[in-house]
Amino acid sequence: MAIQDHSEPIGTVILHHVTNSDVLWPLSLFGFDISITKHVIMLWIAGAVVLTAFLLGSRRYRRERDPLPTGFSNMLEMVVEFVHKSIVTPNVGAAHAARWSPLMLTFFTLIFTANILGMIPIFDLIPGGGGGTATGNVNVTAALAIITFLAIIVAGTLEHGFIGHWRNLVPPGIPWPVLFILIPIEILGMFVRPFALTMRLAANMTAGHIAMLAILAPIFLLGSPWVGLGSVPLNVGIFFLEIIVALVQAYVFTLLSAVFIGAAIHPEH
Amino acid sequence: MEKLVSLDTGLIFWTWTTFLIVLVILATKAWGPMIEALERRQHNIAEALAAADKARAETGEMSAKYEQQLRAGRVEAQEILTEARVTAQKLRAGIEATAHTKADEIVASAQERIEAEKVKAIAEIRATVVDLSLEIAGKVLERNITSADNQKLAEASLRQIGKA
């Protein structure tokens, strides 16, 4: 966050913090703009953290047949077990859990890591714009939700065949005139679900940051450090709340993805 | 404000790229093996618990069987002891009875023999006394002596007999 220029309106400062930076390194691929911005960098850092943590923590699982969990690997195992046993298995079913757990684990770990990294101000030191919460950007959450959208279709198609999956959109035994209302609703629902995923995660991650900055703003607006006596403790409280939100939103995104995939596999429920 | 929701194809591209790289690497290197290990551990624990339950049931069954055997053994031992005691008592009574009979017999035969010896001894004494009397009488008649001599002679003769 660059607040060097104090004459800048507070609204601009806040927006600067929660929105993506300008292009740091212009790139293009087949005519598409794939320039590197601060949210791309934050995303890479999140990916690198997740990769490093899980590759280091799972070394013994690749070497030994029945490794006993110790220390760090115990913690990672807890995450894997939580997603596999508490999110995927109840929604997708035990028979399909092993297939979908890796996808759900990637959602959970990547989103949670990106959420938490956005709360660590050290990344502001990155030259050219600094840190930020990648998952607070709708483009990131939309890209993730599109993966869920595709996964739902893949899951339904693998289980019921291509035609079977689309037929499952409408429950059987419905009188035909109802179909005229139901089919548009179901098609709309198909897009509303990932859209809701997109907006929920992005809005939640952005809102916390806006709230914290808005609470800090009076210190600068009134130009008195005494305002900090109120703003800072309040922000500490919100910071703890944000840690919970970061965890809950990663959980909610993963859980809803699992629920949608489960619904495509078991349409009768 | 429009920056909050503006389309950024580059970011979408990089999100997919990052996501796919993390997914592919971790699915094969970390999550696959970890989920497999978790499932296998769960299976092993369930199996171990079932085996422990089975072993416990078996142990209970076996200990019940042993206890029953022990009880049966104790009863049998008691029976054997009682039987042995009865037999011993019988045996003792038999032995005592036989011993009594034998002792009585021995005493009876001893008494018989004593009686017979006594009779024989008396007969012998009687015969000896007669002989001696005859001898003493002969000596008395040969020497014609006084009654005092007779008396002395008789006594000497008797003494001689006693020495012999």
Image (tube, rainbow, N blue to C red):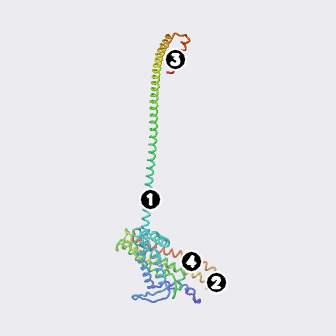
User: Residue under circle 2?
Assistant: A225
Q: Residue at x 51, y 74 (%)?
A: A247
Place of residue B132 in the rendered image (x, y in percent of width and height, measured from the top left): 48, 15
Please tell me whether mark 4 sits on a helix, a strand or a loop: helix
Residue type, label 2: Pro
User: Residue under circle 3?
Assistant: B158
Residue type, label 4: Phe
Q: Which mark is residue B52?
A: 1
* Disc 2 from disc 1: Cα separation: 68 Å
Q: Classify 10 Å Cα crowding around label 1: few (below 14), some (14-19), many (20 and above).
A: few
Q: Classify 10 Å Cα crowding around label 4: few (below 14), some (14-19), many (20 and above).
A: some
Q: Are marks 2 and 1 on the same chain?
A: no
Answer with the quarter of the image where residue B151 lies: top right
3 or 1: tag closer to the N-terminus: 1
Q: Where is the N terminus of chain A found, in terms of image quarters?
A: bottom right
Q: Which mark is residue A239?
A: 4
Q: Nearer the viewer, mark 4 or mark 3?
A: 3
Q: Residue at x 59, y 77 (%)?
A: A236
Q: Chain of mark 4?
A: A
Please tell me whether mark 2 sits on a helix, a strand or a loop: helix
Q: Nearer the viewer, mark 1 or mark 4?
A: 1
Residue type, label 1: Ala
Place of residue A117 in the rendered image (x, y in percent of width and height, measured from the top left): 51, 80
Q: Are marks 3 and 2 on the same chain?
A: no
